[in-house]
Amino acid sequence: MCLAVPMKITGIDGFNATCEAKGIQREVSLFMLQGEPVDVGDHVLITSATPSRKISAEEAQSTWDLFDEILEHA
């Protein structure tokens, strides 16, 4: 099982993107999202340095809120 982490795209160069979440930046490949238009400012779910799908900003925030809640009680 993999944990998908929501990240915001901050830069795109061809099939590569820079994504950010909670002050952490990662370089990811957009190759798997070829059929879906993505732009700077979009949110994606990242699994093993590869986005699995595009999500809304609300979905990303809701996921981070749940992660924060889980970590509060860990």
Image (spheres, rainbow, N blue to C red):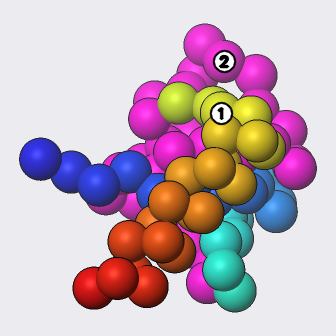
Question: Left or right of 8: which side holds 11?
Answer: right
Q: How many marks?
A: 2
Q: Position of residue 59 (x, y in %)?
A: 66, 40
Q: Is residue 27 magenta?
A: yes
Mark-to-mark CA distance, 2 and 1: 11 Å
Quarter of the view holding residue 34: top right
Q: Nearer the viewer, residue 33 or 52?
A: 52
Q: Residues within 10 Å of mark 2 (few under 14, many from 20)?
A: few
What span is in magenta?
Answer: 24-52
Q: Where residue 23 sits in the image (x, y, percent)?
A: 69, 86
- Callout 2: SS: loop
Q: Which mark is residue 55?
A: 1
User: Foreground residue, 34 or 68?
Assistant: 68
Crowd band around label 1 with a 10 angstrom C-alpha radius: few (<14), some (14–19), many (20+): some
For the residue marked with disc 2, what is the amino acid? Answer: Glu
Q: Amino acid at mark 1?
A: Ile
Task: For residue 28, say whether it is visible.
Answer: no
Residue occupying the point 12% across, 47% down:
1
Which of the two discs, 2 and 1, labels the residue nearer the N terminus?
2
* Mark number displayed over residue 1: none
Judging by the rendered image, the residue that carries numbered circle 2 is: 36
Q: Are marks 2 and 1 in contact (CB under 8 Å)?
A: no
Q: Position of residue 29 (x, y in %)?
A: 51, 50
Residue located 29% across and 55% down the image: 3
In the displayed structure, would residue 25 be above or below residue 4? below
Is label 2 or label 1 in front?
1
Quarter of the image for the C terminus: give it: bottom left
